[in-house]
Image (cartoon, grey):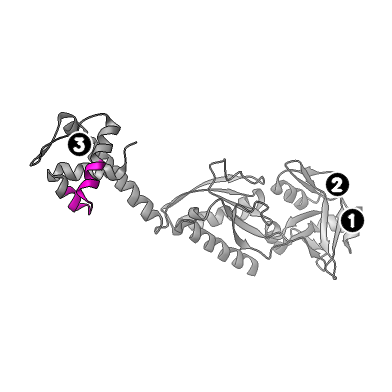
Amino acid sequence: MVRFEDLKIFLAAADQGSFSAAARELDLTPAAASAALKRLELALDARLFVRSTRSLRLTGDGERYLEYARSAISTLEAGKNAVARSKTEISGTLSVSIPSDLGRHVLLPWLDEFQGEHPRVSFQVRISDRLADLYRQPVDLAVRYGTPTDSGLVALPLAERNRRVVCASPAYFARHGMPQAPADLRRHNCLSFVLGETLHDRWTFQRGDGSTLTVPVKGDRVGDDGELVRRWALAGHGVAYKSRYDVLSDLRAGRLVEALGDYASEPSPLYLLCVHRMLLSPAVRRLREFLQERFRQFEAG
């Protein structure tokens, strides 16, 4: 394998016509420079210099290789500089996985706004309620609800105080009445969400003493897409248990009505996930700050 540093020594020796001068230029000993050239010749299986006690000149193979060595060094230096710039500039391509409902109605406009402020950033967006496999799929970041279970992931909080809310359309509650306690949900048509093989048909609340109360629910509709469940609720087909941020605009506009507001519902914190802290480029850090601020503004109305 050809070493980057050996190529630099080869170029310096060719330009200076001397191992000693090349060694001085690169702050090396002559012996280290000579060893580097021997490694390079061994890797190429070719003699690159004709040496004598007083002179050093390129062989025919050395002349032919010189052009490629200069090009390789130039390309590698450009790559090194590009990586260095990426650590200071808000630029580059970010591949982001976002949840269905929140993604379409809240995050996509915010990503457009972020791109307007930082035009050197480009996005590749995947919308799905399934958590992308950040180790195998070409995804840099994922915005997801819930405390991450994979301790190997880097989890950056975006909105830690978010919770789920029980909600339905005004028309539904006008027909079927408003539940006054979590146990009343057993009498309602509850819209359930399924993720993978897991059916979320047990809704959890907190009692005043800190203990939890889990209510099994039933209904005539089950969906594997968060937006679909919200649309069913808006159409008056039943009661949903949604992340507050998914339905906050609908609640404020009166399209949906919250029930059981006196009961502490299930936490649903929002995180930005990635696989390693080395991926936290300036663009990622700025995006995280931007989204945190947007969620604060969203919450404040």
Q: Is residue 16 left or right of residue 290?
A: left
- Dot 1, how many residues are within 10 Å of its Cα: few (below 14), some (14-19), or many (20+)? few
Q: Which mark is residue 122?
A: none
Q: Quadrant of the C terminus?
A: bottom right
The nearer-to-camera label among 3 and 1 is: 3
Residue at the disc numbered 1: 176
C-alpha span from label 2 to label 1: 14 Å
Query: Is 81 situated above or below 68?
Result: below
Q: Quadrant of the N terminus?
A: top left
Q: Is residue 211 left or right of residue 60?
A: right
- Three-letter residue code for mark 3: Leu
Q: Which mark is residue 219?
A: 2
Q: Residue at x 91, y 58 (%)?
A: 184
Percent position of residue 36, x then y: 26, 42
Camera-side residue: 11 or 55? 55
Residue at the disc numbered 3: 66
Query: Is 241 situated above or below 194?
Result: below
